[in-house]
Image (cartoon, coloured by chain):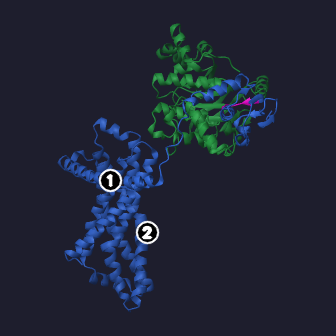
Amino acid sequence: MNGSPAEDARVQAAIEHDAIAIRVRGLRNSFGDHIVHEGLNLDVRRGEILGVVGGSGTGKSVLMHSIIGLQNPDAGEITVFGESMIDREDEALALRKRWGVLFQGGALFSTLTVAENIEVPLREFYPELSTELRDEIAAYKIRMTGLPADAGPKFPSELSGGMRKRAGLARALAIDPDLLFLDEPTAGLDPIGAAAFDAQTKQLQQTLGLTVFLITHDLDTLYAICDRVAVMADRAVIAVGTIDELLATEHPWIQEYFNGPRGRAAAPTGDADAKKSGNIPAETSKS
Amino acid sequence: MTHAAQFSLEDDGRGAPVVRLSGQLAIAHLGNLPNELEALPGPVAAIDLGAVEHIDTIGAWIVHRQSRAWSCPVEGADADATRLIEAVQAGSEEGSSAVRPLAVPPLQRVLAQIGEAVVMAGQTLHGLIGFFGLTLITTWTLIRHPSRLRWNAVIARFEVVGVSALGIIGLMSFLIGIVIAQQGAVQLRQFGMEVLTVNLVGRLTLRELGVLMTAIMVAGRSGSAFAAQLGTMKLTEEIDAMRTIGVSPMEALVMPRIIAVVIMMPLLGFYASLIAIIGGGFLSAVSLDITPVSFIQRLRDVVPVHDLWIGLVKAPVFGLIIGMTGCFQGLQVKSNAEEVGLRTTAAVVQAIFLVIVVDAFFAVFFTWVGWT
């Protein structure tokens, strides 16, 4: 809405070429008098990991909820894979089969075991699969997300925080989505667990060719796995780009964020760079 | 672009057919393919993926499990397919991971459930007695240091437990009074003793039903609320936080609730009995031609005042039971949200059960002391 006609035409062409997975234009969200978003624009390209950062209360989660249709915006336009998300509350929306969501804290169904949790989307969307095949799929998803082999029959309350996140990720990946939403996946994990989770996310993204929309506060995650970073402030996305591009902008929040003590500590320089790349599988070729 | 996944059998002279898969080997386009492949009898020489347009992990898993079932090689896989098949089979050689809990034979399961229920009942009783002791100790502490009791919390509970319940308890009691009078009158009419309806309404409501029905209503309204509130606070670690700050949850959360319900029960019970008598009087006036004045006069003649005392003595005991089971069950919540629901149910069921058991003891006791 805000872009020039030429740019809009370019974006339209990009959508047709399947290059843009999510497109948000002129989004406005408010709760009562409190305006969360105003004129927010964002494009997520296909096959990238987009990190979304911003101070607390800048509406990162609200943005995610708007995109996946849990929150109906006041105004604006959201398209996912070229389909509009506005006023599409019908539960049968075919798009739901194409994305997986990992909520903060995992949001596992507490009355179901881990394996049953993973099987819920399979059962719901593809009832024709045999029980046996569903069990096998759940079993390899459990392994792929790095959960121990005996995690399947356990209940979420028996798992640690990190394992709960992994189980949530396994459920989000159950139906092989094209698009993955992660809401603070490494929050509350110890640094080793967080690094392992990052490496896992990157590896899965490359293996499965996923587009990832990742909300995070974790600077290490940003440096380690994000292709681009979107910065939210002042009710909108104020900048999108690689970290180097963002460092070149002059917005005070961005400068403080990346050049603060934690930002500098996370920045890969020399030794740290070598160590970090060890965490990530070497193959970076995108298909 | 969206071609459903299909397969065809081709014979290229290797003695067994080659299964040639084509189209989109992704979950959205699989259709009935997995079942058809499974039904296909071996032997199969090879699985050919040359014509597959797109593959995802579920497609890769199906290829993997069929190649394992037929023990045949996979041919013609492109880089994507090879990578995905490797990814899904990684670790599957170490024995597949468990998905379901081990099945237990039915007899053993039933016996285990019975045993578990007995142990649970024992533990609950043990816990409740312990909690009663803890309540007494806390009461003694508060008597010695009255300033530590949170009067604001107590007053707030008075409102929630007592004042807010007036409407529903009043309505319930009024209707119960009408029902007793009406049903009693129908039976007593056979003896021409309709006037005894007054005895029935007066004695029954004051002695038993007024307080008992109030206790059931309060257990449902407030006992459940106590359990759910404390259970949720336990889950969100509020109670642990309190302890670390040096605030005793017994003093800050449990005692105000128990005090409130112990004080409110006699008041609500008295109110309920009164309204039930009014209900009975209303019906007597409307359909039995007993005027309100003669109703009251007869009430004074036939209802001994100790009936009122019997009701009012029981009420605080019932209140204590309701408050204690509610708070006790709430504090037992661990780990997950489902338990809040289970504990809330347990609180109400146990409170009502114990109230009725204790009521039976009271009935025997008061008859024994001659208050008939």
Amino acid type assigned to the residue bearing label 1 in the image: Thr
Residue A261 against residue B341 in the figure, above or below: above
- Rendered hue of chain A is green
Q: Marks 1 and 2: CB-CB under 8 Å?
A: no
Residue range corresponding to the magenta coloring: B53-57
Extreme residue toward the bottom, this view: B192
Foreground label between 1 and 2: 1
Q: CA distance from mark 1 to mark 2?
A: 34 Å
Residue at x 45%, y 40% (from the top left corner):
A157
Specify whether B304 is left or right of A256. Answer: left
Which residue carries the number 1 mark? Answer: B124
Task: State whether residue B163 appears in this view.
Answer: no
Q: Residues within 10 Å of mark 1 (few under 14, many from 20)?
A: some
Q: Residue furthest left?
A: B144
- Image check: B296 left or right of B61? left
Chain holding disc 2: B
Q: Identify residue type, mark 2.
A: Leu
Q: Which residue is mark 2?
A: B171
Residue A15's x, y, as percent?
76, 28
Number of marks in picture? 2
Query: How far from the left and from the top, in percent, is residue A182?
Result: 58, 30
| Chain letter of the residue beneath label 1 in the structure image | B
Which sits in the foreground, A50 or B338? B338
User: Circle 2 — which element?
Assistant: helix
Magenta region's main secondary structure? strand
Seen from the viewer's position, the closer of residues B223 and B65 is B65
Residue located at (27% from left, 51% from top): B131
Spot the residue most to the top: A270
